[in-house]
Image (cartoon, rainbow, N blue to C red):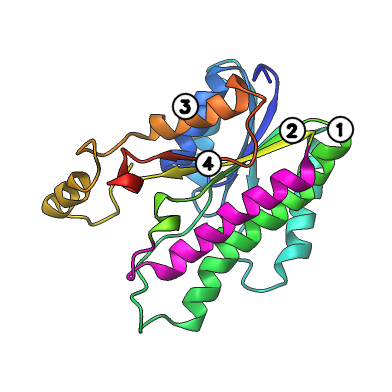
Amino acid sequence: MKLEDKVVLITGAAKRIGREIALTLARSGAHILIHYHTSRQDALDLKKQIESLNVEASLFPFDFSCPTKPLVPAIRKFVNQIYRKIPHVDILVNNASIFYPTPLGKIKEEEWDDFMTVNLKAPFFLSQEIGQRMFRRKSGKIINLVDWTVNRPHPDYLAYTISKAGLAAATVGLARAFAPYVQVNSIAPGPILPSRGLSKKDRNAVAQKTLLKRFGHPSDIAETVRFLAEGTDFITGALIPVDGGSHIA
């Protein structure tokens, strides 16, 4: 699938890795649908930057935590809003997520629900809504960002990792359900951007746990997304680690 003139919805696109994905795909000529929640100014800045590349960008705000109403009808309404403005979505990148520690023995039910809603429930039902439309068009791609720890969960981040492991499992199920027309894959980033507040000492410790002894760059993830979007139409149901070898270290 060539990206030129294709429509790509990227959740959590305004900042960090999502922003790099948006710019990378825009440079290949894709029309970018920028989803954001609270980062409106960042989203506006990204839109301006993409439009400077002579490609289109559109903004679509939405809160995937959906604290005041049922999530699934709200996602359906969100998707309908998109399709009223855009004829179709060619590629969905489920990037938006939340991350914070939840040590075993201290995990609260609301924290568990928070992770499962934003990191698993929201991307699953968004994929269901858009994937069915892709299937009817007999063309589309869904790319989920999970985490390298899905097969090696850390006790201090269990709720987060379990939500991402669920999304990795959903990737396989959706790939089977939407075959042969829609390819569904997941990417498992390792240490790419340091967590906020991480000390230099702790950052070095994280880097040393990778085989390559360093952090990656958001472009490593963005280029993997671009490969799955444009470089091949013969991969589906896969989980691609982009983690400096962390998963085998």
> Is residue 193 at least partly visible in the picture?
no
Which residue is depicted at the point 52% across and 63% down?
163
Residue 61 lies in the magenta-colored region:
no
Crowd rating for badge 3 (residues with CA inside 10 Å; few <14, some 14–19, many 20+): some
Of the numbered discs 3 and 1, the one sitting upstream in the chain is 1
Q: Which residue is drawn at 32% across and 45% down?
A: 248
Say which label, 3 or 4, has the lower sequence index: 4
Q: Which residue bears the numbered disc 2?
A: 140
Q: Are marks 2 and 3 in contact (CB under 8 Å)?
A: no
Give the crowd class for mark 1: few <14, some 14-19, many >=20 residues within 10 Å.
few
Give the number of the disc on residue 137. 1
Q: Distance between the residues labelled 2 and 4?
A: 19 Å
Disc 1 and disc 4: Cα gap in Å? 25 Å
Q: Which of the two discs, 2 and 4, sits closer to the camera?
A: 2
> Which amino acid, by three-letter code, is at mark 4?
Ala
Residue 219 sits in quarter: top left
Are the residues at dot 2 and dot 1 in contact (C-beta closer than 8 Å)?
Answer: yes
- What's under tag 2, amino acid-wise? Gly
Q: What residue type is labelled 1?
A: Arg
The region drawn magenta spans 153-179
Q: Nearer the viewer, residue 47 or 139?
A: 139
Residue 18: where, in percent of width, then height?
49, 40
* Residue at (78, 48) in percent of width and height: 177
Q: In this view, does 182 lie to the left or right of 202?
A: right
Which structural element holds mark 4?
A: loop
Q: Residue 13 carries which label?
A: 4
**Frontmost residue, 49 versus 32:** 32
Along the line of sight, which residue is nearer the eye, 81 or 150? 150
Label 4 crowd bin: few (<14), some (14–19), many (20+), radius 10 Å: many
